[in-house]
Amino acid sequence: MKEIHELDLPDDVRYAEDHEWVRSEGSKLVVGISDYAQDQLGDIVFVELPEVGAKLSKGEAFGTVESVKAVSELYMPVGGTIAAINGKLEESPELVNNQPYGQGWMVEVQPGDPKEIDALMTQQAYLEMLKGL
Amino acid sequence: MNDAVKMTRLHQWHVQQGANMARFGQYDMPLWYRAGAKNEHLAVITASGLFDTSHMSSIMVRGADARRLLQRCFSKDLHRCIGRQQEPLMAGRSVYGVFLAEKGDVIDDAIVFQIDDAAYLVVVNAGMGPEISAHLRSHSNSGGADISDLTDALGKLDLQGPASAKILGRVLADPASVLTELPYFSFTGHFDPASPLSDSVKLVDGTPILLSRTGYTGEFGFEIFVEPEQFTQVWERILAAGQDHGLLPCGLAARDSLRAGAVLPLSHQDIGPWPFIRNPWEFALPYTVDRSGFTKQFVGADALLSQKDSPYTYPFAGSDLRKVTAQDPASVFYSSGDAIGTVLTCATDMAIGRSDGNIFSIASPDKPAGFQPRGLCCGFVIVDRPLQPGTTVRLKDNRRSIEVEIVTDIRPARTARMALAQFLT
């Protein structure tokens, strides 16, 4: 298990309590799971993602991530419409382990309320939350 | 039961190696190390893996009444249990069986090792030493058996996988004399330097070990028992010796997925407080040839023989790697739509996959060209009716529903029973 100081927690994304991250890219938001989440789950062997066009509210499950240990729900950190999904994860789910903030991204969302991201945690706030776990 | 978290002697080592730790029974144990559970699982199929299993309990049963006591409490008939000829258990051999309550429910499963005429090592699950010791004492009326619970007083490590014999050969003082004929479920040596048996297996530094051709992975390998003071150095010595053979330290996640694929039960999950009957492990019962009764009387026997409406336990294999979460719980549905039972274990065996419907392993000699499996979900279900192999049932948890096939076996081309000599060339 990674020590807190070993975790990769970039400061250009915001974090949700369920360990998803969100990055603003133009008018869209890109969503994935944090380094902490992938480390806790272990080898990710399957990722189930929603259909493009699905409308989901904040907190709603948008898919599952399956590791050798468990199957976990993925929750929308912001509400909106699924604009794209990362099709590479079907063949290479391990990208979530190897590059959680890069090639391991999961969905792109057209947010209903672009300001919703501001309510999510900054890197510093997320780090504080992890220290408390 | 004491709720304090226990640790094995290797706990600090596990943490230093960056293992993901989790509570298992009373113990804080590694789930996987940096290599990850998938690589650890595959290492045991293709090379070798090393497991810290000293959380398991061992009990030494000695004395003139020891055999009679085990014959009374353990499900195997110790007079008829070795090989096709059904020979008696003898020194240097071991058997798998269960300890049952009077009503036929499982208290725990175990391997009984016959050390000599009046000493038996009973290896049970983590935390079960006190309960099985008490159970044995309650049936030891004559006081002719001395029962000592060795929980936390014995180191145990499992070296599993096809490279295990070669790796072991590098750490044994006299490999040529030890790695000869050591059939499945036999053992040699002793962990206690005071025992004359300890002379027969020593490591290069003189540490005596009890070396057993057993394991919980379905693959060729050994269980090694050693005095706790020697445990860490033996662990590190074997790991170093196996480095260029692809040996990986392995955690409980790989142990669980390997045993599920090998159709081995997890006590208190796949067998437990219900009658030990109508399951894939009835070979642990001493049936007569015509299966009309048992060859001996033992605790729980009458209850099993009078069972009429016990549920049925079957192995299953999925069509891909997606699992359901047995703890949700997950239910089993028949094609008619009827709910017929629950899922006991659901794991992913990462070494297998399907081709034209048939299951192959990466170790299968007849695997299709270019076979690169992504794993199959597998495990055990307990249902209210008999099902034929090949029957499709649906497993459903809180989030998904998957179709699986009732099978008689899961991971093909397992190596546990193969002759030792094949692994030395």
Image: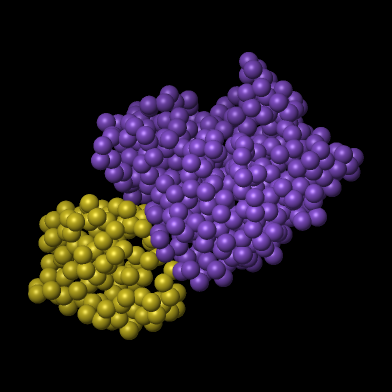
Residue drawn at x 57%, y 50% as measured from the top left: B169
Residue drawn at x 35%, y 67% as measured from the top left: A37
Q: Is residue B184 above or below residue B30?
A: above
Outermost residue, left side:
A26
Asked where in the image residue B362 lies, by quadrant, the reply is: top left
Q: Position of residue B130 (x, y in %)?
A: 73, 53
Q: Look at the image and give the colour of chain A.
A: yellow
Q: Nearer the viewer, residue B97 or B160?
A: B160
Outermost residue, bottom side:
A124
Q: Position of residue A32 (x, y in %)?
A: 25, 66
Residue drawn at x 46%, y 65% as measured from the top left: B20
Asked where in the image residue A30 lies, by quadrant, the reply is: bottom left
Residue drawn at x 65%, y 38% as measured from the top left: B186
For the N terminus of chain B, the image quarter is bottom right
Q: Position of residue B315 (x, y in %)?
A: 46, 35
Q: Nearer the viewer, residue B361 or B162?
A: B162
Q: Nearer the viewer, residue B203 or A21?
A: B203
Judge left or right: residue B335 versus residue A21: right
Judge left or right: residue B286 versus residue A32: right
Q: Is residue B103 above or below residue B59?
A: above
Whether residue B222 is visible here, answered yes or no, is yes
Chain colored purple: B
Q: Position of residue B212 (x, y in %)?
A: 63, 45
Asked where in the image residue B407 lies, by quadrant, the reply is: top left
Whether residue A55 is visible here, answered yes or no, is no
